[in-house]
Image (cartoon, rainbow, N blue to C red):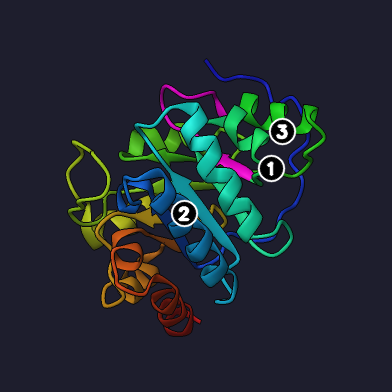
Amino acid sequence: MTLPQLYPIPVLDPIPVLYPILDASVFPAHPDARVAFLTRLGRELASTGLSLLEYRNKTASDAEVLADALLLRAALPSGQVRLVMDDRTDVALAAGFDGVHVDAGDLPPAVARSLFNAAGRVGPIVGTSASTLDALALALREPVDYISFGPIFPTTTKQTAAAPIGLAGVRSFRALAGPDASLVAAAGITLATAPEILAAGASSVAVSAAIFRSDQPAEEVRRWLTALA
């Protein structure tokens, strides 16, 4: 069922060419170490010129996700870096995040957007995902700012049963979406493969392991921003 769009969609700045995803799998297990890690990482990322970051945690409780999110928000001020929460619209609002990424099983995009607007957070970033062309056709009818698609290549940071679509799949997704839709290619992307993915039709590349499993994530962000500029 297609839900009605409850509020007008404001015109937002474009989704940047680099869409980093900070996955909780890279966090230290000990609570004190986790706080120190997120505080330090957030401050380091704030100095890179990064303009958007998604926080993804598929397993922790809402309370744990909120605690992490508040640390990131404190280190990455609103207006400098837009923060997107994976899945949990209520936690995103509680943490002062700028948007949410919703998939099947989460709140529909129209409802997520309406909750942000009802809370006075006009102009949220709302995104969704598609792993097949049929799913893309449905997603294009939703009130979203971007559609993440893939996996492009095999990945170790996100559990998915979908087969990698490769560069031919990127071209097929762009052909169906048309020239204006914001398509964020995801999964298995490296700095070496990102340019050809963008050339094949992606608007942006979502990157997790290649940045946040490195010894110096902030320096890696700088490398990506420079290379993709």
Query: Separation of disc 2 and disc 3 at Cα?
Result: 22 Å
Residue assigned mark 1: 96
Closer to the observer: label 2 or label 3? Answer: 3
> With respect to residue 182, does 128 lie above or below?
above
Q: Position of residue 149 (x, y in %)?
A: 37, 48
Task: Tell me if label 1 and label 3 are in contact, CB under 8 Å.
Answer: no
Q: Could you say whether the residue bearing mark 1 is in a helix, strand or loop?
A: loop
Q: How many marks?
A: 3
Quick check: 165 left or right of 226? left
Res 31 → quadrant: top left
Which residue in the protein does label 3 denote?
A: 116
x, y percent for residue 19: 47, 60
Residue at x 17%, y 53% (from the top left corner): 154
Q: Which label number is shown at residue 226?
A: none
Q: Position of residue 63 (x, y in %)?
A: 51, 29
Q: Is residue 51 shown left or right of residue 133?
A: right
Q: Amino acid at mark 3?
A: Phe
What residue is drawn where x is 46% and y is 80%? Answer: 222
Could one spot residue 165 in this view of the protein?
A: yes
- Residue where numbered disc 2 is placed: 183
Q: Which amino acid lies under the numbered mark 1 shown in the image of this protein?
A: Gly
Q: Main secondary structure of the magenta part?
A: loop
Residue with the most extreme top position: 1
Secondary structure at numbered mark 3: helix
Q: Which residues are magenta?
A: 99-109
Q: Choose between 3 and 43: the one closer to the eye.
A: 43
